[in-house]
Image: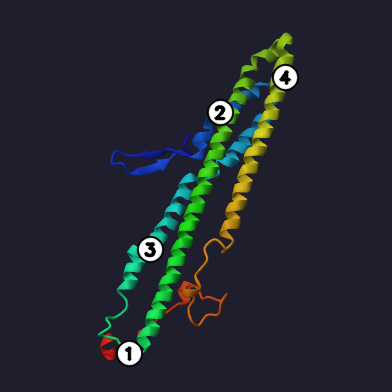
Amino acid sequence: MPPEIFIANASGSVTGTVSVAETTAPVRSAAAIARGNLMWIAASAGLIGAILYLEMFDNQQVNETIKKWEEAARLLGPDQFGAAMAAVPPDAKEWDFDDRDAFDLFVRKLGAEIDSLADAFNTNKETLTSARDAYNDAVSGFAQAMMPVLVAVIASIALQFFPATSASAQAIGIAGLTATAAILVMVFGDIGALLHAVMAGFNTDSRVMFAADSRPGWAPTGTDPGIKDIKIDWVKDSKFYQ
C-alpha cells in the first residue's frame, strides 16, 4: 500500500494527496464506537487524542516544501545557473591581460560553491521526502494494526450485557487496551526516532562537504562567507579592457 495516493484532474495535473486524516478516519470512527465497551470509556478518548495528534502532520505542506527544495536545486544546477555562469566570462579577445587568470579562477570557485549548494538542496529534498514517506508508512501501519483490535472490541459490546459472557467482554476489552497501548508505543517510538534522525541530519554539515576549491581565496578555512556576501563590482565596462 503506497503511503499516499495522488489525486489528478482531467488534464493530469496533481491537485492533492490523501491526507493523514483520511488514513486514520476509519480508526477514529471505530474508536468512538468502541466506547460502548465499558473498559473502553476512557481509553477511546485517549486513542482519539493520539490520532488527532498524528493528524497534525500536513502532507500538502511537506510536499510544497519538498518542491521548493527541488526547484532551488534545479535553478542552481547546470541547466540554469550553470548556463548563466558560462556566459559571464568575456571573450579572450576582449580580456587577455594577467588578471584574466585570477578572474577565471574566481568564477570556477564560485561555480563549485554553487554546485555544492545545489547538492545540499537536493540532499534536503531527499531527506524530507524519506521522512514524509516513513511517517505515512507508520500511520498506515498504525491504522492496519488498530482496525482488527477495534473490531474485536466493538464485537464484544453485546457480550457485556449478558452475565454469562460479561467476563469475556471485559477480557476482550482489557486485551484490546493492552494491544492498543503496545501499538501506540511502537508507532510513536518510530515517529520519534524518525524526527530525531531528520533533525540531526538538518543540523549537521557533514553530509555535503564543500570542496576546498570552492572556498573564496580571501576566506580562511572554516570562515567561509555566505553566498549573499559575495559581490562583484564591475568598475569599468568591457570596452575599457580592450
**Disc nearer the start of the sequence (4/1):** 1
Q: Nearer the viewer, mark 4 or mark 1?
A: 1
> Residue at left 26%, top 85%?
94
Q: Amino acid at mark 1?
A: Phe
The crowding category of the residue bearing disc 2, from other C-alpha atoms within 10 Å (few below 14, some 14 to 19, many at least 20), is few
> Residue at left 54%, top 43%?
134
Q: Position of residue 181 (x, y in %)?
A: 68, 33
Q: Residue 97 — which label?
A: 1
Is residue 242 toward the left or the right of residue 231 in the image?
left
Relative to 80, does residue 220 appear above or below in the rendering?
below
User: Residue 47 lies in what quarter of the image?
Assistant: top right
Q: Amino acid at mark 4?
A: Gln
Residue beneath disc 2: 29
Residue beneath disc 3: 77
Q: Nearer the viewer, mark 3 or mark 4?
A: 3
Q: Position of residue 31 (x, y in %)?
A: 60, 28
Q: Amino acid at mark 3?
A: Gly
**Disc nearer the start of the sequence (4/2):** 2
The crowding category of the residue bearing disc 1, from other C-alpha atoms within 10 Å (few below 14, some 14 to 19, many at least 20), is few
Q: Nearer the viewer, mark 3 or mark 1?
A: 1
**Disc nearer the start of the sequence (2/1):** 2
Give the distance between the C-alpha atoms of the residues marked 3 and 1, in whole angstroms.
Answer: 30 Å
Give the distance between the C-alpha atoms of the residues marked 4 and 2, in whole angstroms.
Answer: 21 Å
The reply to whether dot 4 and dot 1 touch (C-beta < 8 Å) is: no
Circle 4 SS class: helix
